[in-house]
Image: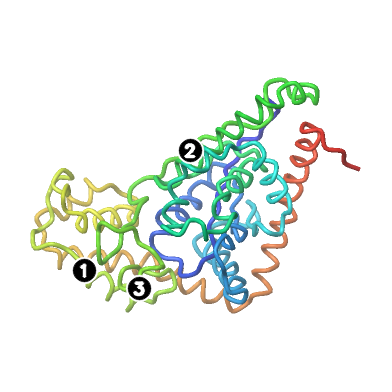
């Protein structure tokens, strides 16, 4: 295997209305990982345009995700923060991977089936092939680790399949170019802790989503203290008090969701939360959850608002990050072109 620096890569789509699920399922984890890893965090705007985006809204959302990264505690000087479209290597490597990946692999991707729905013939080619772009995002930096939730495991498996097939298909050329044991690493998942899959506050069987017509289904990162409090208090529950053991959450999706949210915000566990609030009425528990959520999320929303008031500063962060990312990406593209047999100047 060619010399590989241990590195984390992950990205967030700029599709607007970042919410508690995005924070607990991804961004909070990003903040923690930067203490122990070399990290690259990307606003994946090329993924966003697999479905049509209003250009003005897309620009605003790219900057808003960047503001969220910084407000949540990601350090853009110690690590790399940029938007994907500023580094052309993502698209170049994605095309090469389009020629490595097999149609059958992409046909098995469940997220395409979910997003395209019944009208698959009318879906964009980009929506079908975007797992190849996701693999390119990761392997362009030869990332060794990716933080993933349950809904992204399949895509990471595809990334590993593409890396293995590339290494196998071009094994002789890889060796001839000085990489004796393969070129791309087999990226490993970093599985997050509690509440990695945050559910709707109105329906514990549905994932928290910006597309839900009810704003009360989610806590937006830009919500103020009053909005957070109202949404938590109005969150759907059931008539029974909280159980004292985690086993008692089975079959109670709304209770399980709120306990999981509390645990993740408190850097605790569901069992520890239930040790404190078991047998309590939901009114008592929700009051404590309001206090915790406001304390944790309120400062993030305020800082995002401040950062969005200075777009030139956000753009400077993205430009600096893109320049640093490009140094790594360009070297990968040069080596991949030599391995594949493309002539370059």
Q: Is residue 148 above or below residue 310?
A: above
Label total for image: 3
x, y (%) of residue 26? 46, 53
x, y (%) of residue 271? 21, 45
Question: Which residue is disc 3 drawn over?
Answer: 213
Q: Find numbered disc 3 in the image and state the secondary structure of the residue it sits on.
A: loop
Asked whether, in this view, residue 262 is left or right of residue 148, the answer is: left
Q: Find numbered disc 1 in the image and state the secondary structure of the residue it sits on.
A: helix
Nearer the observer, 16 or 104: 104
Compare marks 1 and 2 and give the one earlier in the sequence. 2
- Residue at horizontal 41%, vertical 47%? 151
Question: Which residue is disc 2 drawn over?
Answer: 189
Compare marks 3 and 1 and give the one earlier in the sequence. 3
- Mark 2 is surrounded, within 10 Å at the Cα level, by few (under 14), some (14 to 19) or many (20 or more) other residues, namely some
Mark nearest the camera among 1 and 2 is 2
- Mark 1 is surrounded, within 10 Å at the Cα level, by few (under 14), some (14 to 19) or many (20 or more) other residues, namely few
Question: Which residue is disc 1 drawn over?
Answer: 287
Compare marks 3 and 2 and give the one earlier in the sequence. 2
Tag 1 and tag 2, C-beta contact below 8 Å:
no
Q: Quadrant of residue 165?
A: top right
Q: Find numbered disc 2 in the image and state the secondary structure of the residue it sits on.
A: strand
CA gap between label 3 and label 2 equals: 33 Å
Task: State the quadrant of the N terminus.
Answer: top right
């Amino acid at each position: 295997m060619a010399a590989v620096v241990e590195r984390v890569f992950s990205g967030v789509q700029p599709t607007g209305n970042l919410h508690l699920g995005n924070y607990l399922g991804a961004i909070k984890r990003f903040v923690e990982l930067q203490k122990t890893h070399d990290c690259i965090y990307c606003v994946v705007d090329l993924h966003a345009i697999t479905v049509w985006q209003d250009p003005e809204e897309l620009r605003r959302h790219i900057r808003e995700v960047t503001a969220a990264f910084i407000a949540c505690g990601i350090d853009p000087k110690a690590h790399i923060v940029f938007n994907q479209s500023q580094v052309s290597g993502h698209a170049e490597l994605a095309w090469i991977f389009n020629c490595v990946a097999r149609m059958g692999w992409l046909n098995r991707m469940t997220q395409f089936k979910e997003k395209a729905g019944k009208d698959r013939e009318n879906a964009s080619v980009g929506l079908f092939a975007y797992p190849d772009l996701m693999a390119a995002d990761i392997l362009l930096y030869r990332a060794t680790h990716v933080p993933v939730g349950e809904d992204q495991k399949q895509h990471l498996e595809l990334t590993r399949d593409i890396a293995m097939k590339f290494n196998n298909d071009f094994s002789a050329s890889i060796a001839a170019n000085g990489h004796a044991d393969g070129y791309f690493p087999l990226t490993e998942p970093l599985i997050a802790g509690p509440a990695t899959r945050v559910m709707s506050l109105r329906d514990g069987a549905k994932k928290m989503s910006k597309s839900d017509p009810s704003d009360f289904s989610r806590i937006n990162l830009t919500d103020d203290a009053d909005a957070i409090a109202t949404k938590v208090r109005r969150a759907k529950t059931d008539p029974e008090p909280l159980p004292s053991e985690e086993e008692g959450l089975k079959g109670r999706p709304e209770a399980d969701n709120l306990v999981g949210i509390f645990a993740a915000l408190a850097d605790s566990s569901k069992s520890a939360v239930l040790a404190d609030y078991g047998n309590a009425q939901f009114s008592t528990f929700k009051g404590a959850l309001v206090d915790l959520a406001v304390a944790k999320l309120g400062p993030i929303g305020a800082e995002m608002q401040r950062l969005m008031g200075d777009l030139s500063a956000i753009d400077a962060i993205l430009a600096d990050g893109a320049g640093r990312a490009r140094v790594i990406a360009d070297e990968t593209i040069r080596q991949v072109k030599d391995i594949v047999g493309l002539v370059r100047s």
